Image: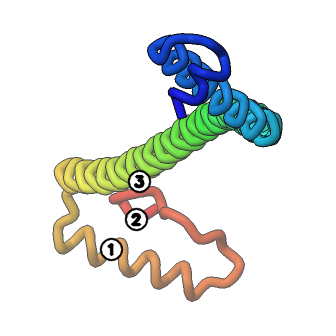
Amino acid sequence: MVQKLAKLTGMSVHGAHLLALILNFAIIVALLAWALGKSVPGIMRSRNESIRKALDDARAASQDASRRLAEIENRLRQMDVEIGRMQAGAEKEAEGEEARIKQAAEDDLKKIIQAAEQEIAAAAKQVRRDLSAHTADLALALARKQINVDANTDQVLVRNFAARLAEPGKPKGNGGGKDGH
């Protein structure tokens, strides 16, 4: 084939061989270009579509992640607010409990003071009774020492008393002491 080409073109066999190689190469390149020309735009469009789809998916994922991040941040802010409310409520409850404890302590103190006052009053009353009894005992002892009634005086006193009881119109009372009047 190379020799026929060399005769037709008037070239040397070596030149014809080179020309055949160049033509074969050009034909293969043309066939490849024609085949690729038909399929490459489709491949490129497909590739562009997949890249565009991947970018859209990435945008959607990014927007979804941003939305979720915003929701999480919002929940964290709400948690901070709720924690603040809980702390305020706990502090208010603690203050109320403290006031209740103070009031209970004051009430207990009043009860203790009242019980102590009652005990003191009862003790004072008992001391007064004991003092009255002791005073009466002392007065009786003193009266016994000062008044000496012998048997004869006792009989005179009893007779006078009986006589007065028998007389209805006369006032009842001491008849004048030891002498019977």
Camera-nearest residue between 153 and 80: 80
Looking at the picture, how far across and down is residue 49, in whole percent? 81, 39
- Identify the amino acid type marked 1: Val
Residue 7 visible in the displayed image: yes
Residue underneath mark 2: 180
Looking at the picture, how far across and down is residue 95, in whole percent? 60, 33
Q: Is residue 42 left or right of residue 111?
A: right
Residue underneath mark 3: 122
- Identify the amino acid type marked 3: Ala
Above or below — where is 118 with respect to 98?
below
Q: Residues within 10 Å of mark 1 (few under 14, many from 20)?
A: some
What mark, if any, has residue 101 been given in the picture?
none
Tag 2–tag 3 contact (CB < 8 Å): no
Looking at the picture, how far across and down is residue 74, in whole percent? 75, 32
Which label sits in the foreground, 1 or 3? Answer: 3
Residue underneath mark 1: 156
Above or below — where is 50 with respect to 59?
below
Dot 3: element: helix
Camera-nearest residue between 146 and 50: 50
